[in-house]
Image (tube, grey):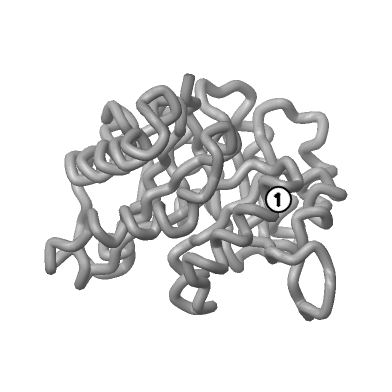
Amino acid sequence: MRKHIVAGNWKMNNDLAQTETLISELKHQIKTSNAEVMIAPTATNLWQAYQTLKDNTVIEVIAQNMHFAENGAYTGEISASMLKSIGVNTVILGHSERREYFNETDDILAKKVDAALANNMRVIFCFGELLEDRKAGNEETVVGNQIKNALFHLKAWDFKNIVLAYEPVWAIGTGETASPEQAQDMHAFIRKTIADQYGYEIANDVSILYGGSVKPGNAKEIFSKPDVDGGLIGGASLNAEDFFAIVNAF
């Protein structure tokens, strides 16, 4: 049975003091939840975040990224085993910003997914189309290829540790708006894509998150759609009250 998940991606925001303050506010507000709740602080604050929340059964600390190599001459990078060693068991991979600014290809992401799964980590795998893809009517082709190229070498049982996150890049900071219906249509397509390869039992067990500017005002309607299982939250996750309201949308 697939799970409801609300994950906050803090991106390159919050120093250590700001991280501790925000976590303290979240601990005060989020005491129970009908969804799995996750936060992804910047890498320098992961250890402190984990230590602060290690006795908390509601909020999980996750990573924003990792390298595919176990170790070696990769200055500035972090491996799966390093994350595991500080209590981090879930990682976001394939975020649109990693694809755009750091040139992460499907092949690179496939290797990162393999490395995470080899270390018994859970992966939140991101993908989504650009504005020009949407305007050209190519959104399903683009999204389908991103999923197939990075994930379809996996075995069916690997999907127990895969969470999918659809990011309509065209609806983030462009002035365009994605409707809950558009989110549902794409999530249904994503689930069918998984079902065509692995069968409906696997597809129906995979959580698919929506990452298109979810806010307190639209979360409930978006999360009510049958194939939307939660959200990957950006800016709104940096405000404790907003994030709490989104979590409570379930």
Number of other residues with Cα within 10 Å of mark 1, as a class: few under 14, some 14 to 19, many 20 or more: few
Determine whether, in the image, residue 215 is placed left or right of residue 237: left
- The residue located at (68%, 62%) in the rendering is 66
Residue 182 located left or right of residue 218? left
- Most extreme residue toward the left, as rendered? 136
Say above or below: 162 vs 225: below
Q: Residue at x 22, y 52 (%)?
A: 178
Position of the C terminus, as image quadrant, is: top left
Q: Residue at x 39, y 26 (%)?
A: 204
In the figure, residue 29 lies in which quadrant?
A: top right
**Helix, strand or loop status at disc 1:** helix
Quickly name the residue at label 1. 21
- Disc tally is 1
Q: Residue at x 77, y 61 (%)?
A: 79
Residue 55, percent from left and from top: 81, 30
Residue 18 located left or right of residue 47? left
Image location of residue 228, percent across then percent down: 34, 34
Residue 161, picture quadrant: top right
Q: Position of residue 78 (x, y in %)?
A: 76, 65
Measured as percent of width and height from the top left, residue 74 is found at 77, 78
Could you tell whether 133 is left or right of 91 in the image? left
Q: Nearer the viewer, residue 248 or 133?
A: 133
- Asked if one can make out residue 215 in the rendered structure from this viewpoint, the answer is yes
Identify the amino acid type marked 1: Thr
Q: Looking at this view, is 169 or 174 the one in front?
A: 169
Q: In this view of the protein, can residue 22 be seen by the observer?
A: no
Residue 13 lies, with reference to residue 221, above or below; the image says: below
